[in-house]
């Protein structure tokens, strides 16, 4: 029996093959996160996959497995409040594992992916998000390993059905879900020590990418929905030589697949040729090769990448990092992916399972654990806001630019504000995890700041009347 905890996957639909208009990051651009509100369940329950409403309404849908589907009203992002709960009992006693949104329809994958039970799909009308209306529920005992995720394209939905492969359903009539076909990726290729699980999915055109866990990365041709065909299969030799490569999720941008490889971090794979996929880069933030197989550093690792979300406007990928909570990745140079920011220091007894991003809001699903493979004592929903901080000051106010000097700073620094403009300002200084380390009110004149901070890299925001004026980086030396 496979001993590693199975993480859930979520699909965020974007035009992954269109990259010409994406924001090109510079090597000094940084993402910082700021905490907003949270809602914690009691010790019995966890959050798994969050989805921020894609019509811009103040709601977050959270798959909680045992609790069912919980809809949160986030009109006040500092105080998310449950507005509705669709219980497991109302869903055929099937646990809720994933969510995807098609306009005013919510697709919900059903079935415990860590146990034995039917795979299912529910479709809700969310014209009024606070009162989801169940339109249809499909399930079958023929696929008895539950589901991990759901995504859709046009009239079809795709379920990651774990050991039972990928299930394709016709959802053209939202009140009459119909089975179309199923494909189980090749079970001979890959790491034979554990079962294969079709978990993370990404679709672009007629090409479906499957993060098949122990089975690596697969490419499926779904042009004929009745007869999907596996075209290619890939497993990293470099990761496999260091530890087991568990592919939890995949997100495609252009010709490159960005893979969440559990405690081994992130991998970039060239998928332009489905029959000959190649590794472009491997980013291993937790040093998964520090112990030999079979387990490497899976138990107690500071991070386990799992779900992936994407901000197309800023060209930033966000990975849920388990004990490391969330990491922002710059995908602009596939050969050199880099961590642009993070939220949540390891070993703080808080861990994430899933992540979503929409606009300047990030939703995290916190999962309770029993110490395996990391310790997390919090289960529920966490909201963050985030900003892309450019490597140089990028804003001006009328008569001139704001200046901060000296930089690096060892004791104090001076803020020089433009001669014209607002009278009152606020400066906030953030650490690498996006937490406010220092804040102060300043006026429109030279102002000396004495932050008592440890040495390291920090980021600042200067704003007036709630509007950001300037952002940048400060290096503090001691």
Image: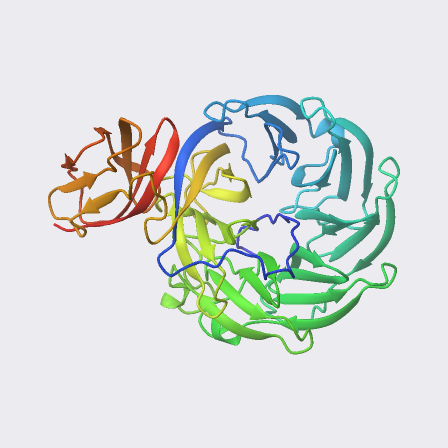
Please identify the quarter of the rendering in which residue 384 is found: top left
Q: Is residue 459 visible?
A: yes
Residue 411 on image: x %, y %: 10, 44
Q: Is residue 379 visible?
A: no
**Nearer-the-camera pick, 229 or 292:** 229
At x 63%, y 70%, the residue is 271
Residue 352 on image: x %, y %: 48, 42
Residue 103 on image: x %, y %: 73, 37
Please identify the quarter of the rendering in which residue 247 is found: bottom right
Q: Residue furthest bottom?
A: 276
Q: Is residue 431 left or right of residue 337?
A: left
**Nearer-the-camera pick, 31 or 149:** 31
Residue 256 on image: x %, y %: 58, 66
Q: Is residue 440 left or right of residue 194?
A: left
Q: Is residue 382 left or right of residue 70?
A: left
Query: In which quadrant of the rendered image does the N terminus lie?
Result: bottom right
At x 86%, y 44%, the residue is 172
Model colouring: rainbow
**Nearer-the-camera pick, 268 or 348:** 268
How many discs mark residues in the rendered view? 0
């Amino acid at each position: 029996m496979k001993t590693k905890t199975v993480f859930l996957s979520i699909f965020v639909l974007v035009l992954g093959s269109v990259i010409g208009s994406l924001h090109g990051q510079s090597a000094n651009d940084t993402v910082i996160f700021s905490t907003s509100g949270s809602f914690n369940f009691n010790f019995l329950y966890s959050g798994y996959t969050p989805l921020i409403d894609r019509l811009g309404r103040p709601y977050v849908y959270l798959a909680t497995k045992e609790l069912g589907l919980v809809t949160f009203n986030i009109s006040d992002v500092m105080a998310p409040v449950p507005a509705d709960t669709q219980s497991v009992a109302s869903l055929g006693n099937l646990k809720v594992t994933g969510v995807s949104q098609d306009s005013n329809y919510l697709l919900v994958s059903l079935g415990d992916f860590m146990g034995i039970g039917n795979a299912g799909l529910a479709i809700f009308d969310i014209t009024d998000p606070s009162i989801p209306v169940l339109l249809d529920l499909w399930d079958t005992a023929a696929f008895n390993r539950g589901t991990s995720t759901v995504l859709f394209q046009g009239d079809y939905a795709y379920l990651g059905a774990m050991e039972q492969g990928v299930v394709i359903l016709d959802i053209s009539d939202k009140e009459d879900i119909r089975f179309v076909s199923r494909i189980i990726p090749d079970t001979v290729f890959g790491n034979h020590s554990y079962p294969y699980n079709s978990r993370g999915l990404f679709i672009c055109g007629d090409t479906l990418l499957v993060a098949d866990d122990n089975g690596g990365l697969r490419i499926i041709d779904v042009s004929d929905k009745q007869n999907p065909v596996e075209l290619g299969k890939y497993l990293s030799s470099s990761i496999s030589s260091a530890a087991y490569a568990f592919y939890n999720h995949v997100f495609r941008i252009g010709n490159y697949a960005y893979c969440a490889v559990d405690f081994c971090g992130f991998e970039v794979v060239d998928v332009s040729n489905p029959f000959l996929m190649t590794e472009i880069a491997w980013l291993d933030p937790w040093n998964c090769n520090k112990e030999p197989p079979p387990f490497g550093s899976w138990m107690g690792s500071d991070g386990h990448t799992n779900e992936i979300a994407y901000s197309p406007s800023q060209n930033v990928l966000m990975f849920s990092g388990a004990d490391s909570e969330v990491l922002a990745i710059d995908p602009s140079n596939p050969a050199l992916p880099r961590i642009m920011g993070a939220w949540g220091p390891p070993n703080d007894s808080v861990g994430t399972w899933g992540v979503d991003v929409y606009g300047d809001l990030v939703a995290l699903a916190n999962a309770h654990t029993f110490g395996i493979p990391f310790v997390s004592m919090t289960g529920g929903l966490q909201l963050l806001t985030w900003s892309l901080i450019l490597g140089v000051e990028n804003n001006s106010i009328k008569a001139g630019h704001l200046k901060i000097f000296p930089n690096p700073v060892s004791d104090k620094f001076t803020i020089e504000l433009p001669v014209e403009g607002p009278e009152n300002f606020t400066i906030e200084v953030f650490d690498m995890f996006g937490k406010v380390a220092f804040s102060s009110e300043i006026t429109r004149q030279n102002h000396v700041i004495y932050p008592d901070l440890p040495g390291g890299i920090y980021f600042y925001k200067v704003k007036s009347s709630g509007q950001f004026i300037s952002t940048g980086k400060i290096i503090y030396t001691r």
